[in-house]
Image (cartoon, rainbow, N blue to C red):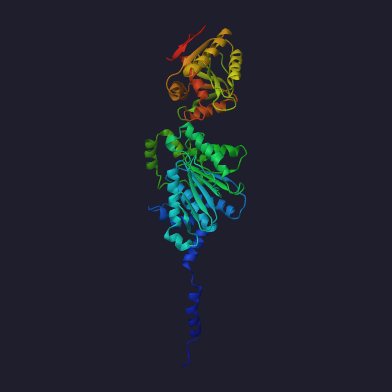
C-alpha cells in the first residue's frame, strides 16, 4: 500500500527526535543550582528548614554577594575583599552563610575546604550537621551524586567528600591546627549573653583577627566572612572594620538594621539597599513593627539597639545623650569651682589609660568639660604627668585622686597626694563605692538635661565616643575621671579625706 500522507515520513521522524533530544530535567536542575547559589538555596531549603520560606529581598542579595566572591576562588583569582555582614537574628543569615554556602561551593569546585566557626562548639556543630544533611539528602544524591562523603571522614563536626573538599567546624578560641580553608566563615563569634565580658570579647577578637588568619589555603584568594549582630563597640565587626580602615584588607560591609527611621537610612550598607526597605522595615513579614516593638521590651534598649539596629549603643547615646553636650570655642571665667580628677593606670603603651579630666562649675549651674589629659604611661611617667598637669592648671584647681582597692591602690593615691600637697596643691582622695555605671549616673543626669558644655579641642572626639558607648565602651577611664570630678564639684556623699588639705582614709 502506498502511503498517501505527505507528512507520514516527517511524523515518523518526529516520534524519534523528542526521545533523542529530550531534556534531562535532573541535569537542568543541577545546572541551575550550580550557576545560581540563590536557586540552590531555594531548592534545598526544605532539607534543613521545615517552615515555608519568606523570600525577602535581602536573601538573594546575600546569596549574590557570596557567589561573586566564590567565583573568584573558583578561578583562583585574588579576592577583592573580605566580608563583615551585620544583620539581625531571625533573618536566615546562618542558613545562607554557614549551612548552604559550604555545600553549594562543592557543586562547582568539590575540592573547596571551609572552616566554619561560632562562639560555642555546640552551635558550630549544629550548623555543621545541617550542612551535612544537605550533602546526604536524597535531592543532593539525585543531582550531585558523584560528590559523596567519605565514610572514614564523616562526623557532624568534620566531614570530607570523595574529591578532597571538607567542612570543619570549631568554637571560638578552639584549635584549628592542621586545617586550612578557601573560605573562613565566622558566624556569631560572640555570645550575646556575654558581650559585656571583657575576657570573652578579647578572646573572640584575638581568635578572629590573629588565629584564624593563619588558616588560609592561599593568603591572596582565601575569603574571610564574618556574620554577626552588633554587640559591643569593640566587637569583632568593629575590629575588622577598623583594621580595613587603617589600610588592611578591604572589607565589604553589609549592614542591614531591622528598621530605619529618617536619617537612620545612612547606616544601611551598601547605602543603595535602603531603597528596598518597606515603611522603614528590613523584612515586613518576619520582622513587622509589632514584633520589633515586643522585642524592644524583651531585649531592653541596649540589646535591641545592638542586635536589631546594628548599633552597639542606642541612637543619641545610651546612658549619656551625647548630642546634648554643647561645644563652645571659648571659655567663661565665672567659676564656682574647678576640679581635675585622675583615674590611674600603670601600663606603658598598652592596657588601660590614665586619664585626668578637668571640669568646672559655673555660677549659672552649668558644668564644663575643660580639658582631658590621657595616656598609657608606666607609673613613673604617669606621676610626672600628674605633677606637670597640676602645675599647668594652677593652685585654684582642686586635684582629685581615685583610690583603687587594696593596699597598693591606697599607697599609690597617698604617695601622689603627699607629693602634690607638698607643692601647695589642694588634693582630695576618693574611695569609690558601687560599679562604674552607678558612679557615673549623677553626671549623666546633668548631661541628659542639657546642663553640660565642652571646650572645642582635639580630645573631644575620643571623649564623646567613650561617653556615647558607656558603659559598653572599650575604655571607661575618661568617664570614671569625669564622674569623680563631678562628685567633688557637687560634694556628693562619698568617702573623702585630706592630708594638708586631705585626711588619710
Across and down, in percent, residue 387 comes to 59, 14
Residue 450, relative to residue 89: is it above or below? above
Query: Which residue is nearer to you in this view: 171 or 369?
Result: 171
The answer to whether residue 255 is seen in the rendering is no
Across and down, in percent, residue 166 comes to 51, 52
Query: Which residue is nearer to you in this view: 299 or 316?
Result: 299
Query: Which residue is nearer to you in this view: 113 or 51?
Result: 113
Residue 69, relative to residue 193: is it above or below? below
- On screen, residue 300 versus residue 418, left or right, reads left
Residue 371, quarter of the rendered image? top right
Q: Residue at x 52, y 47 (%)?
A: 115
Across and down, in percent, residue 458 comes to 60, 25
The answer to whether residue 475 is seen in the rendering is yes
Residue 494, relative to residue 86: is it above or below? above
Residue 501, relative to residue 229: is it above or below? above
Query: Which residue is nearer to you in this view: 444 or 104?
Result: 104
Outermost residue, bottom side? 1
Q: Which residue is drawn at 38% across and 53% down?
A: 52
Outermost residue, top side? 500
Across and down, in percent, residue 140 comes to 45, 60
Q: How many labels does the image show?
A: 0
Amino acid at each position: 500500500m502506498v502511503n498517501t500522507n505527505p507528512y507520514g515520513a516527517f511524523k515518523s521522524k518526529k516520534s524519534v527526535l523528542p526521545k533523542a533530544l529530550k531534556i534531562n530535567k535532573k541535569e537542568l536542575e543541577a545546572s541551575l543550582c550550580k550557576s545560581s547559589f540563590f536557586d540552590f538555596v531555594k531548592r534545598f531549603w526544605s532539607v534543613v528548614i521545615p517552615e515555608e520560606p519568606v523570600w525577602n529581598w535581602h536573601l538573594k542579595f546575600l546569596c549574590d554577594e557570596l557567589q561573586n566572591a566564590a567565583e573568584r576562588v573558583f578561578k583562583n583569582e585574588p579576592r577583592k575583599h573580605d566580608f563583615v555582614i551585620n544583620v539581625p537574628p531571625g533573618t536566615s543569615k546562618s542558613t545562607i552563610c554557614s549551612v548552604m554556602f559550604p555545600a553549594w561551593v562543592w557543586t562547582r569546585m568539590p575540592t573547596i575546604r571551609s572552616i566554619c566557626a561560632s562562639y560555642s562548639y555546640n552551635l558550630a556543630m549544629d550548623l555543621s550537621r545541617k550542612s551535612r544533611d544537605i550533602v546526604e539528602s536524597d535531592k543532593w544524591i539525585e543531582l550531585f551524586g558523584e560528590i559523596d562523603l567519605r565514610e572514614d571522614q564523616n562526623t557532624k563536626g568534620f566531614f570530607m567528600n570523595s574529591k578532597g573538599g571538607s567542612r570543619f567546624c570549631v568554637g571560638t578560641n578552639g584549635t584549628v591546627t592542621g586545617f586550612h580553608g578557601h573560605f573562613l566563615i565566622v558566624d556569631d563569634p560572640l555570645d550575646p549573653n556575654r558581650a559585656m565580658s571583657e575576657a570573652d570579647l578579647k578572646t573572640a577578637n584575638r581568635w578572629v583577627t590573629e588565629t584564624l588568619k593563619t588558616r588560609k589555603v592561599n593568603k591572596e584568594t582565601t575569603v574571610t566572612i564574618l556574620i554577626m549582630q552588633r554587640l559591643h563597640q569593640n566587637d569583632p565587626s568593629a575590629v575588622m572594620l577598623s583594621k580595613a580602615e587603617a589600610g588592611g584588607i578591604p572589607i565589604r560591609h553589609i549592614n542591614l538594621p531591622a528598621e530605619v527611621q529618617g536619617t537612620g537610612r545612612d547606616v544601611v550598607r551598601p547605602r543603595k539597599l535602603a531603597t528596598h526597605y518597606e515603611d522603614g522595615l528590613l523584612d515586613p513579614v518576619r520582622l513587622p513593627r509589632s514584633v520589633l516593638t515586643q522585642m524592644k521590651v524583651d531585649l531592653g534598649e541596649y540589646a535591641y539597639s545592638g542586635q536589631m539596629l546594628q548599633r552597639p549603643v542606642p541612637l543619641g547615646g545610651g546612658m549619656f545623650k551625647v548630642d546634648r553636650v554643647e561645644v563652645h570655642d571659648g571659655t567663661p571665667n565665672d567659676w564656682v569651682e574647678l576640679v581635675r580628677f585622675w583615674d590611674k593606670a600603670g601600663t606603658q603603651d598598652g592596657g588601660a589609660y590614665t586619664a585626668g579630666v578637668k571640669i568646672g562649675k559655673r555660677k549659672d549651674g552649668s558644668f564644663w568639660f575643660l580639658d582631658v589629659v590621657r595616656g598609657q604611661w608606666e607609673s613613673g611617667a604617669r606621676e610626672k604627668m600628674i605633677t606637670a598637669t597640676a602645675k599647668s592648671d594652677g593652685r585654684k584647681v582642686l586635684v582629685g585622686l581615685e583610690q583603687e582597692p587594696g593596699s597598693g591602690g591606697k599607697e599609690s593615691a597617698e604617695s601622689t597626694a603627699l607629693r602634690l600637697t607638698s607643692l601647695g596643691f589642694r588634693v582630695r582622695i576618693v574611695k569609690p563605692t558601687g560599679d562604674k555605671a552607678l558612679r557615673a549616673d549623677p553626671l549623666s543626669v546633668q548631661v541628659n538635661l542639657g546642663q553640660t558644655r565642652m571646650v572645642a579641642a582635639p580630645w573631644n572626639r575620643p571623649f564623646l565616643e567613650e561617653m556615647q558607648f558607656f558603659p559598653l565602651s572599650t575604655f571607661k577611664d575618661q568617664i570614671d575621671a569625669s564622674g569623680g570630678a563631678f562628685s567633688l564639684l557637687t560634694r556628693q556623699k562619698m568617702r573623702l579625706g585630706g592630708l594638708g588639705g586631705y585626711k588619710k582614709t
